[in-house]
Image: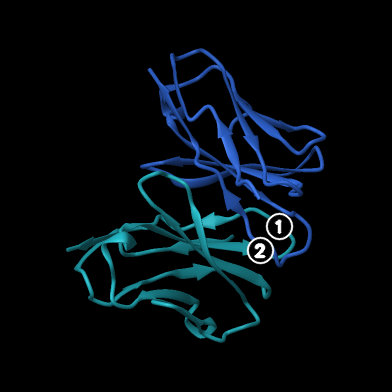
Amino acid sequence: AQKVTQAQTEISVVEKEDVTLDCVYETRDTTYYLFWYKQPPSGELVFLIRRNSFDEQNEISGRYSWNFQKSTSSFNFTITASQVVDSAVYFCALRQKGAQKLVFGQGTRLTINP
Amino acid sequence: KAGVTQTPRYLIKTRGQQVTLSCSPISGHRSVSWYQQTPGQGLQFLFEYFSETQRNKGNFPGRFSGRQFSNSRSEMNVSTLELGDSALYLCASSSGSGDHNEQFFGPGTRLTVL
């Protein structure tokens, strides 16, 4: 069975601090896909990144970076120099090869205080 | 391209009634997935439709059903509503073919059952 765990329920930091959101996953598949989504108060899930299981290269996009480590089954997300607009609930998700179904973690509510 | 649209955005029903929610995917996308989001259970997969056929189904009772039309628009129906069906229902669309595709979510329909 597939499972995603986001142990941090809520994180609160002051603006400009760096913050890391943890994601640990479980799967027996050798090929799978990992995602991060952002959910602002409006409710819509906004796609941030997709990572394939066979590509462990870390990725940076502006203030966002992702660290994928198969050895620890983790796919962590770091926001550098956080801003108030980063406040949202962030979800990590897992998808097996050949399927569209996403298995989500419970989400981490991130609050950036001015 | 226009994004995923869902109607209505808000619904209030009473126990025992039934409800139909609608989702229009991004133009050209053939896969539509539905998710239920509640504070207690988080984001859970309901079902996925591709080219008018249900391809995958989550662990929900038979009161939850869906369909997809030839233009890829999808509806989901919940019969004999229960208080526990109060949730945000999210629809996601993707090309549905191959593994290198992302799901894009609509704004959701917030259903309240009284």
Is residue B98 toward the left or the right of residue A14 in the image?
right
Q: Amino acid at mark 1?
A: Ala
- Which quarter of the rendering shows the N terminus of chain A? bottom right
Does residue B33 appear in this view?
Answer: yes
> Label 1: how many residues lie within 10 Å, few (<14), some (14-19) or many (20+)?
some
Determine whether the residue tagged by mark 1 lies in a helix, strand or loop: loop
From the image, tell me which residue sits under label 1.
A99
Q: Place residue A14 in its image quadrant.
A: bottom left
Check the residue under mark 2 and report the chain it is in.
A
Asked if residue B42 is positioned above or below residue A7 in the image, the reply reads above
User: Quadrant of the image for the C terminus of chain A?
Assistant: bottom left
Q: Which chain is cyan?
A: A
Residue B60 image point, x, y percent: 58, 36
Q: CA distance from mark 1 to mark 2?
A: 6 Å
Quadrant hosting residue B113: top left
Q: Circles 1 and 2: CB distance less than 8 Å?
A: yes
